[in-house]
Amino acid sequence: MPRRQILSSDEKERLLVVPDDDILLTRMCFLSEQDLVLINKHRRPANRLGFAILLCYLRGPGFTPDKNSLPHDGVMSRVAERLKLQPDLWREYAAREETRWEHLAELYRYLRLAPFSRSLQKTCIRHLYPHAMRTDKGLILAEEMLAWLHNNNVIFPSVDVMERTLAEAATLADRAVFSTLTTQLEQRHKTALDNLLASGDEQLSRLAWMLQPPGKINGKNVLQHIDRLNAIEGLALPEGITLSVHQNRLLKLAREGRKMSSRDLAKFSGTRRYAMLVCIISEARATLTDEIIELHERILGSLFSRAKRTQAERLQKTGKLIQSKLRQYLTVGQALLNARESGEDPWAAIEDVLPWPEFITSLEETQFLARKDNFDPLHLLTEKYSTLRKYAPRMLSALQFSAAPSALPLGNALDTVREMYRKQLRKVPSTAPVKFIPESWKNLVITPSGIDRRYYEFCVLNELKGALRSGDIWVRGSRRYRNFDDYLIPPADFEKSLKEKQLQLAIPTDCQEYLHSRMTLLASRLEEVNAMAIAGDLPDVDISDKGVKVTPLDNNVPSTVSPFANLVYGMLPHPKITEILDEVDSWTGFTRHFTHLKNNHVRPKDKKLLLTTILADGINLGLTKMAESCPGTTKASLEGIQAWYIRDETYAAALAELVNAQKKCPLAASWGDGTTSSSDGQNFRVGSHGRYAGQVNLKYGQEPGVQVYTHISDQYSPFYTKVISRVRDSTHVLDGLLYHESDLEITEHYTDTAGFTEHVFALMHLLGFAFAPRIRDLHDKRLFIHGKAEKYSGLQSIISTTSLNLKEIETHWNEVLRLATSIKQGTVTASLMLKKLASYPKQNGLAKALREIGRIERTLFMLDWFRDPALRRRVQAGLNKGEARNALARAVFMHRLGEIRDRGLENQSYRASGLTLLTAAITLWNTVYIERAIESLKRKGLQINEPLVSHLSPLGWEHINLSGDYIWRNNLKLGSGKYRPLRTVDVSLYKKQA
């Protein structure tokens, strides 16, 4: 049986590498007086140099340089300089293998290093075992092994020995995981699990039925999902069966199992089969629970939308009648006024303008028009009561809710409604909880005759939606609707990290120190901007009693940019999109990141199939049409690639490879240094089955759609993308900055108005990012200060009457730090926490404290915006790059009318990731060839105005053939280091235009 492969060839090369960091190299090459005495015992200069380099390697990273290659340049130059020797002496030293072994033996004794014996190997495996229980990623385990060897003064073995050790630890962990997941299973459990794989005469097995997506948004599909959840509960698996296994392991096994057919799962040995089924079922339970709640929320949302539309339609239909009644009663009123002035009989005056029978009829009509349901859509909700009643009883029966103290009245109300359904009561008990009912609902729910049952149910289930989002109510078995505190790092771990100053946040952890520094800065900035406002020195900003007015920026792009861009783009080759992907892969090898789900070291045998699958996602063609458009390809082969090699993490790793490659291009530095970025959402219409998954975002109109949120660097490369559905853009701003995998080090980030809230301002600052949104309604925003507004007469008109509440920050400071640390460490995503915080009741302490921090940071930002036109230009330029990238994405995503027609979020995510990868590949390809075109022009003697280069964009696509048959051809002329020939252009025409 072949030995298990833990490390890929790339990972083996990365494992034993000396870092390029100057500080680390200097520390590694430090030689003490004792070291020098030992080194100088060796007579020959080459031996002294070689001995010293081996010493630095062994004491530093722990391994020795390969005898057939040169040591790191930084190490060799530093050691040679310290010993006053020539670096070239290494070649002479490396020629004698016997000398090298003698020196190593001497150094092992000097450094007290022990050989990696079998007993030490067993000890090492015991150390690696708990780590292997958490992850099976070879590189992570290898890095942990290196750290253990280094800390225990053990000589590094060969990479092969290390890999065998890692394989043994990983195999032991695999067996332990399978055993842990199956030990509690009784025979009845195993029989029930095996029955899930049997399909019988039906096409779908029971397991495949359980894993079906929800489909259309209606009560029928909620009931089907509840049936699936009840079927899982009916398996009666032991409580907490998965708690002893790390979440990473569970997710990987579940994902692997979901990709397999029931027939394939049935072929596994019993222990492995049952373990995988337990993982699949565990994840399916959480997914079903969350999807049931989401279906309920969307049904409620559609009922409210329908009520609003009905109310608006009724109002529109009766608009003319209302106008006529207003004019009629205006006439009656005027007649009464005239009668009083003239002393006439008022009754006769009314009769003159409106006969009495007509007056009575008019009153009856007006009484109908004045009904509340003509003006308040809540009155129309119960017209669709049957929709809610269809699934609500079973939903409340299937889901187990728990409530925080602040939400206990609502929790008790849920119990009341559940009991009413169970006992089939027609009336709401007089003792039913009502404290949770909002003011807008009270007159509808609580009537003179008692509690209105229909409105009570609607109110309870509507308030449940908000409480679930905020975390005040949570659901057993849910992944998305858990107790808020469960998402954060444990309090004991936080207190320990706080005490040891290991929170790794960008702010002082002492509250008073933090507040003093921010208030000092705020006061200083207020005084500066106030003085500029009084003197009229704020550039393009006018602050008066009417508020603030910022003059829009003028276009600072030189007129000569357009002819220069035309010249450069005219020189670029005209490739097909398939040729671009193939060529970019030959430069970067990004396809190596698409590894097999079961084995990270297995890659597709046919790279062209992989590229075809990626292309199908990126241009929105789909696998069926792509198979027809790509000769020699079948839909089945593409589906196999998609099932086993296409995942969010493989797309993310490949995208990072392209971003890093573009960052290394000299031309990219002309556009930015890779430290600033912007993000924006892009709406794609949904069609066919996708309409069930699409959601309405009023920012993009009334039609359902899918929003793809993308981060782009100042060098034009898109480095993070995410499908965000209907939620506000600001919820996902931090995700891209924290969770991208590229080498970009972003310090400043830009968004439009939809990308900011005060909570985002707060967390961006706490996590070390400068946040600069373009706020559309800036004239309506106010500055928040601590103190009296009279001190700043030039700003008084835009200072809020509400002062900063520093007491809230002081009271909840540790909660703020714990939240920020949890996000920083990856315990929970920033987007999930921001959604929870946005749904929190206004009186929640943590949300209020974050809001106050956000107000401080927003005020500082607004003051900077007023005084610094360079900041405004940076933000404008950054957002323009994002809009240009969106235009490229729209052009690339051309098939199927540019609509997303996938029903499941997973496939929608693949579409978005494929599109982003494709635009990143085009950006890199354009960057390389634009750079070559400019160099060619320089060689021809054309004087290039360097500032013009910064205005070029690598996002053009007119020269790329995006449609037609997608054929992959091997271009033998494009060997390593070779490029396509540039096109010939008439430079003289450009000279005339310039």
Image: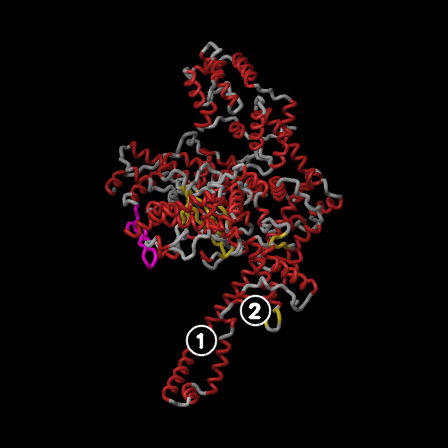
> Residue at left 54%, top 61%?
302
Colouring used for the render: secondary structure
Q: Position of residue 60 (x, y in %)?
A: 51, 24
Q: Which residue is mark 2?
A: 444
Q: CA distance from mark 1 to mark 2?
A: 25 Å
Q: Residues within 10 Å of mark 2 (few under 14, many from 20)?
A: some
Decide which of tag 1 and tag 2 comes sooner along the chain: 1
User: As rendered, which of 568 and 189 lies closer to the eye?
Assistant: 189
Q: Quadrant of residue 546?
A: bottom left
Secondary structure beneath label 1: helix
Question: Looking at the picture, which amino acid does disc 2 mark?
Answer: Leu
Q: Is residue 467 visible?
A: yes
Q: Position of residue 922 (x, y in %)?
A: 42, 41
- In this rendering, position of residue 269 left or right of residue 511: right
Q: Quadrant of residue 264?
A: top right
> Residue at left 58%, top 32%?
141
Q: Which span is picked out in magenta?
A: 536-556
Which of the image's four quarters has the C terminus? top left
Q: Which residue is mark 1?
A: 322
Is 270 above or below relative to 405? above
- In this rendering, position of residue 162 left or right of residue 864: right
